[in-house]
Image (cartoon, rainbow, N blue to C red):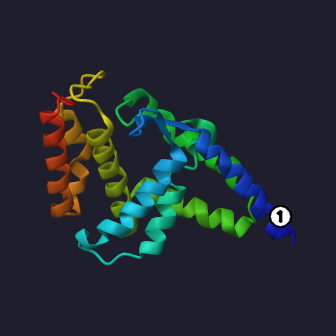
Amino acid sequence: MEAIESKVDFVKEIEKLKTVTRFNRTLDGRFENSAEHSWQVALVANLFQDYFPEKLDIGKVTLMLLLHDLGEIYAGDTWVYDTTGKAVSHDKEYLSLQKSLAILPIIQGEKFTELWFEFEKGNSPEARYARIIDALVSLINHLVVSEEGYNPDKLTAERVLTKKAFIKEDSEILWQLAKELIEKSVEKGLYS
């Protein structure tokens, strides 16, 4: 009974992910939370898997994406273009993740930690694919929810292309999609 109680406590813990505000917005104009983002990327990964050239364990990808932002519970979200924040976000998120996973039985916590590190390092086909989906969903989100001309951070298409260039190493089709989304965002005035 102790194991199930610790899992219930973990479910209570991950409620906190719903309170972590991200920098992306939703269609109704509010900021999305990290739980919504994790759900969306996990679903999208299942939709786009045919466009990745390697065989994938999609269950592993899905779990990886559901876990990838869990470290934001105590560390918060770091904007992808915040170079100063990104320099320390990995360590902060790891400490946060460990605090949350300590609630689980040790074996379960270790498995989740391994998947989190695998995603962070991008050292498997599943992790590389998950990172691509994470990047693509943000591009789609920005294009769909942002009002025409919205570019308060003065992002350039070149900067966004550079940030997303890792996609082309694994999937030409998904890289073409990324470039098309960025071009449509330029046309909408979201990047200069």
Report whether 8 appears left or right of 154. right
Instruction: Please provide percent x and percent y for residue 63.
Output: 51, 65
Please state if 67 lies on the left or on the right of 153 as rendered: right
Q: Nearer the viewer, residue 30 or 185?
A: 30
Q: Amino acid at mark 1?
A: Glu
Q: Residue at x 24, y 55 (%)?
A: 167
The residue tagged 1 is: 5
Helix, strand or loop under label 1: helix
Near-viewer residue (69 or 186): 186
Farthest residue in the right direction? 1
Residue 58 quadrant: bottom left
User: In which quadrant is the N terminus drawn?
Assistant: bottom right
Q: Is residue 118 above or below residue 152?
A: below
Q: How many marks?
A: 1
Would you identify the image quadrant in which residue 158 lies?
top left
- The answer, for residue 124, to whether it is visible in the render is no
Q: Which image quadrant is residue 11 in?
A: bottom right
* Percent of width and height locating residue 37: 46, 49
User: Could you say where residue 115 lies in the image, as x and y percent from the top left?
Assistant: 52, 63
Q: Please report the residue visible at 56 percent of the width from the left and 42 percent of the height from the top.
A: 72
Q: Is residue 179 positioned above or below 66 on the image?
A: above
Residue at x-position 22% and y-position 31%: 190
